[in-house]
Structure formats: C-alpha cells, structure tokens
Amino acid sequence: MPLQANSDLGSLEPLDEAHAGPSYEDVCGLALSDQTCPATDQANLAVLAAVAALDMQHAVSGRDDADTLSQDLQQLDNKLNVLIQMFATFWRQQCAFPPAHAVTVSADALRLDVTGPNDDGELLQQLESGQARSVSLYLHDALPQPLVLPLARCEVHQGGDTANWTLHFAQLSQELEDALARHVFRRHRRAVAQSRVLQPSSAGE
C-alpha cells in the first residue's frame, strides 16, 4: 500500500515546533525511491561516521589558534583539506549526484521546500503520488555514498507557489537512531556557533 500524502493544512507545524529535538538547515543532494530502504544499518552508520570525520576536519581547518596546533600539524591539516576538496571535485565530475535541495534535517524528519515543477518535476511527482518509501541524502560534497532512510509518511503544506513537505522517517534501529541524533546535534551546534560569530558585536552600543 503506497504512503499517503497528507494535504491537511492544519496538520503540519514547522519542523522546529513539531519536533522537540534540534535540527539544522543544509543544501544537499536528495533523491526519493519507491523501494523500502535498500541500505543496511551498517552502510548508514559508515556514512554518518565518515560525515562526522569530514565535518571535524572542516572545523579544525577553520581554527587559527597557533597555541593548539603546531605549525607542522597545521600545514599537514591544510594539505589534507586540499585533498578532500580535490576528491569532492573528482566525485562530482564522475558521479551522477541528484539535484541539491534546501532541507531542514532533524533526527526523525526532513523538511523540503519545492517551489514547483520547474524546481524538480520528478521529485514533486514522487511526493504527490505517495509512492516515496525512502530518501537518500548526500550529506557531504566529498562523500559519494548517501544516507538512505525509510519513510513512514509525507505531509504537505501548500503556501503560494511553494509546497513545504515534511518527510517523516520510519522506525530506525536504536544504534542508527542514536547515530543520526548525534549527527543532527553536531550540525545544529555548528550552525549556532557560526551564527554567533556572524552576529555584529553590541559591546559598543
């Protein structure tokens, strides 16, 4: 039986209100499938572990604290970062990544804004048909393997020319659920830290 798309306007709350846990915004490759989550837990756990390592590399590369890293380690770190970027470029050229979409990710759902058929007609058709049973998320440019999660249901809130879809994940194993929650928390914490850095200082006011 296909999943039903819920178009009740009153049933959908914003992701950060409907879900108590943290979330983060991103732009990443996304694809839907009518197959029930072909990826195994081990494959998904490996993807999340690789993303965590790549995110950590990004965080370390952005630090300017000379007292924390020696000059030699900093140079090695810079070279590794260059290799990661080269690898990402190579995979982008060799692999057929799906179109990127602006998403909001939490530990139990994904919010996706689709502006219309010109944005991604195939994706919109899959959502409206109620046949989407799993979602593949490409969480890092340097990682060609996606995180593939099963879907329990999809809900839509139509606002003007934009359809806001919430894709609720199906029940995950405890190990995968915990790993996904850690990933979301790390990305959420990083986004909060970056927003604080970008905020203008009010010390002189």
Image (tube, rainbow, N blue to C red):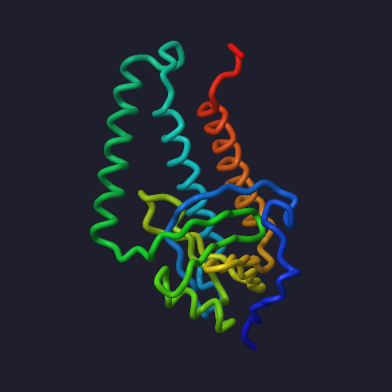
Rendering coords of residue 66 (x, y %): 41, 13
* Quarter the N terminus occupies: bottom right
Q: Residue at x 51, y 79 (%)?
A: 126
Rendering coords of residue 48 (x, y %): 52, 51
Rendering coords of residue 143 (x, y %): 38, 52
Name the side, left or right, on which 15 lies relative to 112.
right
Rendering coords of residue 205 (x, y %): 61, 14
Between 31 and 122, the one nearer to me in the picture = 122
Q: Residue at x 33, y 15 (%)?
A: 71
Between 58 and 53, the one nearer to me in the picture = 58
Between 164 and 72, the one nearer to me in the picture = 164
- Whether residue 128 is situated above or below residue 31 in the rendered picture: below
- Whether residue 162 is situated above or below residue 2 in the rendered picture: above
Name the side, left or right, on which 125 lies relative to 174.
left
Q: Residue at x 66, y 72 (%)?
A: 152
Q: Residue at x 50, y 67 (%)?
A: 114
